[in-house]
Image: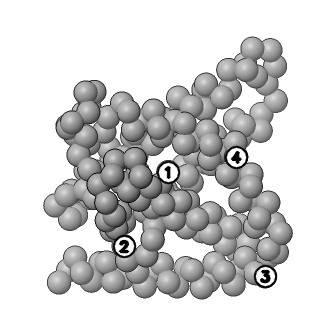
């Protein structure tokens, strides 16, 4: 059980870092707004991406392993795309309400400038990117990272999970303390 928790936490943290890198890439390279720290915590991670990745694994791993026949086999990527798009969009909407309640705002840009949006909290264009990202995550990154963790071995994975877990925990405590101050 401990081995599984270690792996899940490391995957959560890894995808949180990837989310942060993706956000910074969008800001600096695509939109050319310049650099700003895209996370609410001190470290280079956006935990909402880690949560989204864990939800994708929870919801779609069995579906990806299932033996499908006929046309269903070819429609699976489309179903995964739509499922990831819907799940990530629902997560972003829920997180915007939760973070607004806790902090007074949500830490990502408003989508009011997008043609199809809901209250500036979610929009069609990012939702489509979430669907594509979900496909990339489930079909490419997750198998790659899973093999990487297998190669590290249980002892190293456990040590790495403890070390990064302690750092992440302290970062969360620091953030909570800053909210209360």
> In terms of sequence position, does the residue under pointer 4 or pointer 3 come before the other?
4
Asked if residue 141 lies left or right of residue 91, the reply is right
Q: Residue at x 60, y 85 (%)?
A: 163
Which residue is tagged 4? 140
Q: CA distance from mark 4 to mark 3?
A: 25 Å
Q: CA distance from mark 2 to mark 1?
A: 17 Å
Q: Locate the C terminus by quadrant.
A: bottom left
Location of residue 26 in the rendering, given as x and y in whole percent from the top left corner: 40, 51
Nearer to me, 122 or 24:
24
Q: Residue at x 19, y 58 (%)?
A: 105
Q: Quadrant of residue 1?
A: bottom right
Which residue is tagged 1? 52
Circle on res. 155: 3
Which residue is tagged 2? 41
- Mark 3, Cα crowd under 10 Å, few <14 / some 14-19 / many 20+, is few
- Identify the element where label 1 is drawn: helix
Q: Residue at x 69, y 35 (%)?
A: 63
Nearer to me, 180 or 121:
121
> In terms of sequence position, does the residue under pointer 4 or pointer 1 come before the other?
1
Q: CA distance from mark 4 to mark 2?
A: 27 Å
Asked if residue 146 lies left or right of residue 102, the reply is right
- Mark 1, Cα crowd under 10 Å, few <14 / some 14-19 / many 20+, is many
On screen, 13 above or below 124? below
């Amino acid at each position: 059980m401990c081995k599984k928790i270690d792996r899940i936490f490391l995957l959560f943290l890894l995808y949180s870092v990837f989310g942060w890198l993706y956000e910074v890439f969008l800001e600096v390279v695509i939109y050319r707004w310049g650099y700003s720290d895209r996370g609410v915590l001190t470290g280079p991670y956006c935990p909402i991406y880690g949560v989204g990745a864990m939800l994708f694994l929870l919801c779609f791993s069995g579906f990806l392993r299932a033996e499908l026949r006929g046309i269903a086999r070819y429609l699976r990527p489309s179903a995964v795309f739509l499922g990831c798009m819907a799940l990530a969009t629902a997560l972003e909407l829920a997180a915007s309400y939760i973070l607004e309640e806790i902090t007074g705002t949500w830490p990502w840009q408003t989508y009011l400038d997008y043609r199809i949006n809901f209250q500036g909290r979610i929009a069609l264009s990012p939702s489509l990117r979430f669907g594509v990202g979900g496909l990339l995550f489930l079909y490419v990154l997750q198998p790659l990272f899973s093999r990487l963790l297998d190669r590290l071995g249980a002892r190293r994975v456990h040590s790495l999970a403890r070390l990064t877990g302690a750092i992440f925990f302290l970062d969360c405590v620091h953030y909570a303390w800053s909210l209360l101050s």
